[in-house]
Amino acid sequence: MNETIDFRSDTFTLPTTAMKEFMFQAPLGDDVFEEDPSVNELEAYAAQLFGMEKALFCPSGTMTNQIAIKTHTVPGNELICNSESHIYKFEGGGIAMNSGVSARLIQKSDGFINAQDVLDCVNPDNVHFPKTTLVSLENTTNMGGGLCYDLAEIKAIKSMCKTHSLKLHLDGARLYNAIVATGTTEKDYGQLFDSISICLSKGLGAPVGSLLLGNEQFINQARRFRKVFGGGMRQAGLLASGGLYALKNHIPKLKEDHKHAAQLVEACTQNPTFESVQDVQTNIVMAFTKSEAEVVVKRLQDKGVLCVAVAAKKIRFVTHLNITPSQIEKAAFILKNI
Ligand SMILES: *Cc1c(COP(=O)(O)O)cnc(C)c1O
């Protein structure tokens, strides 16, 4: 039987034995009463890392994003984001359903927006127009192929937001990949954003959970919405401790995932099945196929390499904690020869 090598997503990471042992020992309480010591420790630790006032532990990154949008807006407002962004494309229409907010989309396939886009899309103060109140960035960009924002660009966006009294949210599901790849720090981002969401359950390897960061007033309000959305959990320290373990132990390992992704790119470029492969910055590889992507995905699956077709002729591979160097070598061999 072929061993499967799973590049479908970094959400497939399983907790390590050491992480599970740490979770098993975690002191617990009722987090809705704010009495779970492990949740409190994780939230305080993350807030301090980012130099932000407070953090809130939530079940998923979709929830942290949706709570952030809800907290920053009132119904009838408009937010600005990229058309490929997770908050718009992959959260079930939550912007409209949960917050009654419209999305002004910047159509760029790399997943980025820039300061000029914000200026072009912010509505004038006029009764005809929805009031623009929020800008949301994604870093790294998922559909863009794990690309990282230049900090200077974020600063320019921030300054535009200030001029137009807009809040700035970061969907940082893979922010740690960007931090590791660009040599930036948590505090670089903490200084620029009104709210940040980070996933603990992707490359960082915790089984469940995301964090929302912001100032005290924001997080207090976000905590109310977390309850409304059904995300107030009880002995959540069992999960939060996995996140704490991840933040303390797994960040440096992301570098290895990035190296692995580069090895996959190298392999794909040697095979004419692939029309081209996007330059890789972090742990996401986007390969363009000459024939139907689904067919290539199936052929790879038959060889034990799992990946997903994200467009008719585009395949996504995501490297992560559970992929070993020998699996990468094996996958690279298959990619060269498929
Ligand atoms: C995975 C992801 C999320 C959150 O996903 P959940 O599965 O709800 O935790 C948010 N944004 C981006 C860009 C993602 O890739």
Image (cartoon, rainbow, N blue to C red):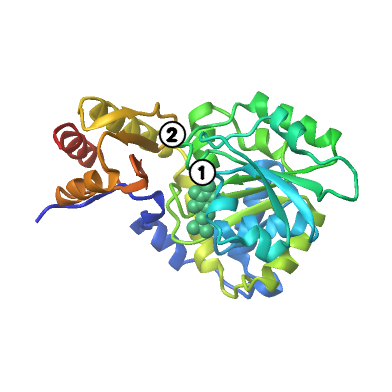
| Residue hosting label 2 | 282
Q: Is residue 218 left or right of residue 289?
A: right
Q: Residue at x 29, y 43 (%)?
A: 293
In the depicted structure, whether residue 218 falls above or below residue 168 = below
The picture quadrant where one finds residue 329 is: top left
Can the viewer see residue 199 in this picture? no
Q: Nearer the viewer, residue 245 or 27?
A: 245
Residue type at mark 2 is Thr
State yes or no: discs 2 and 1 in contact (Cβ < 8 Å): yes
Label 2 SS: loop
Placement of the C terminus among the 4 image quadrants: top left
Q: Nearer the viewer, residue 75 or 198?
A: 75
The label number, if any, that marks residue 114 in the structure image: none
**Residue 15, percent from left and from top:** 38, 58
The label number, if any, that marks residue 174 in the structure image: 1
Residue type at mark 1 is Arg
Q: Quick one: which residue is furthest to the left in this view?
A: 1
In the depicted structure, whether residue 267 falls above or below residue 87 = above
